[in-house]
Amino acid sequence: MEQIIVNGLYMGAQYALIALGLTLIFSLMNVLNFAHGQLYVIGGFMTYTVSVKLGMPYIVALISAGVSLAIIGAILEKFLFRPVIKKSVREESTMLLAAGVAFFLDAAILLLFGEKQRGIPKIVDGVFNWDFIIIMPYDRILIGCLAVLIVILFIAYMQYSKAGRAMRALAQDKVAAQLMGVNIDRYSMIGFALAAMLAGVVGGLLVSITGVNLGMGGPTSIKAFMMVMIGGAGVIPGAIAGGFILGMMESVGLTVLSDFGDITYLVIFASLMVFLALRPQGLMGKPWG
């Protein structure tokens, strides 16, 4: 049981980071970013390129991935999503745009990095072994701790910084925030860049554990949407809760259901459908309408 909990917390910390970026974009712009998983994949490949191909230290590669994805996110918001949101009268337009961006990024990833699995050497060698009750490689412990630290820093930034307060105001009431002098365009771009950076950092963290390949974008986006639905769309604490809940469900499923074949996600999806039928707004979200 202790091993299941530790594994669930490890996965949940990284899932929470992925969900935070997606829910931030939704709360600021009411956009379901189907390309979020592709941003995660680009972050992993960027980390691999800087670390392995250029021979730079891992921390430099991770920072490079975060900064690069923040720039990509700002460009996507300014030149694609912002014009569509301003000119379109239907919310479906942004969904179609996000899907198109996802396909475009898949093609760009294939062209730039290829379709092969890529990974980097272990950051830290060795395995933590507590009386054979809890066994965890040190690199996973380090990655999990970094993920938790980034979640804490993100919450502090949103709570205490000027930009964070402005973004929270936009998420609550755009009209009121604009009347109080908040620049919607500026802080929407900052929010999109921050969300893309979080996705890139998670990709950079996990490239040392699971590696990265072209096909990971879609499944990552699906997991992100699952976490947001569990916690409540547009609710930052809900995204964190959804990430840890999904991580724990995966850990339990992969351990308990291993004798029944690969049905973990079948059970998770079935449980999610039942949950949403009973509480469609998620754990912390407000009822729609």
Image (cartoon, rainbow, N blue to C red):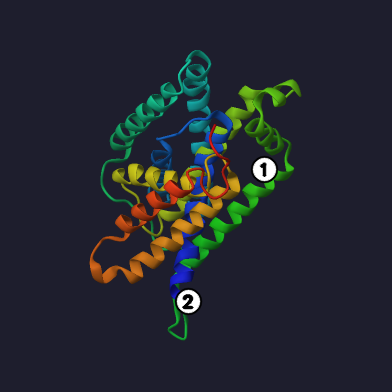
Label 2, secondary structure: give it: helix
Q: Is residue 121 above or below residue 135?
A: above
**Of labels 1 and 2, the one closer to you:** 2
Residue under the image location 55 percent in, 52 percent down? 240
Q: Residue at label 1?
A: 158
Q: Residues within 10 Å of mark 1 (few under 14, many from 20)?
A: some
Q: Can residue 233 be seen in this view?
A: yes
* Residue 65 at x, y percent in the picture: 48, 43
Name the residue nearer the viewer: 273 or 234. 273
Name the residue nearer the viewer: 219 or 257. 257
Residue under the image location 29 percent in, 34 percent down? 111
* Residue 239 at x, y percent in the picture: 53, 48
Q: Earlier in the sequence, mark 1 or mark 2?
A: 2
The quadrant the C terminus occupies is top right
The disc at residue 96 is none
Q: Is residue 127 visible?
A: no
Q: Residue at label 2?
A: 2
What kind of residue is marked 1?
Answer: Met
What kind of residue is marked 2?
Answer: Glu
Identity of the residue furthest to the top in this view: 87
Q: In this view, does 286 lie above or below 258?
A: above
Gap between marks 1 and 2 measured at Cα? 33 Å
Q: In this view, does 29 lie above or below 165?
A: above
Residue 161 horizontal side relative to residue 132, left or right: right
* Residue 194 at x, y percent in the picture: 57, 38
Q: Is residue 9 above or below residue 158?
A: below
Label 1, secondary structure: give it: helix
Identity of the residue furthest to the front in this view: 278
Q: Do the residues labelled 1 and 2 touch (CB within 8 Å)?
A: no
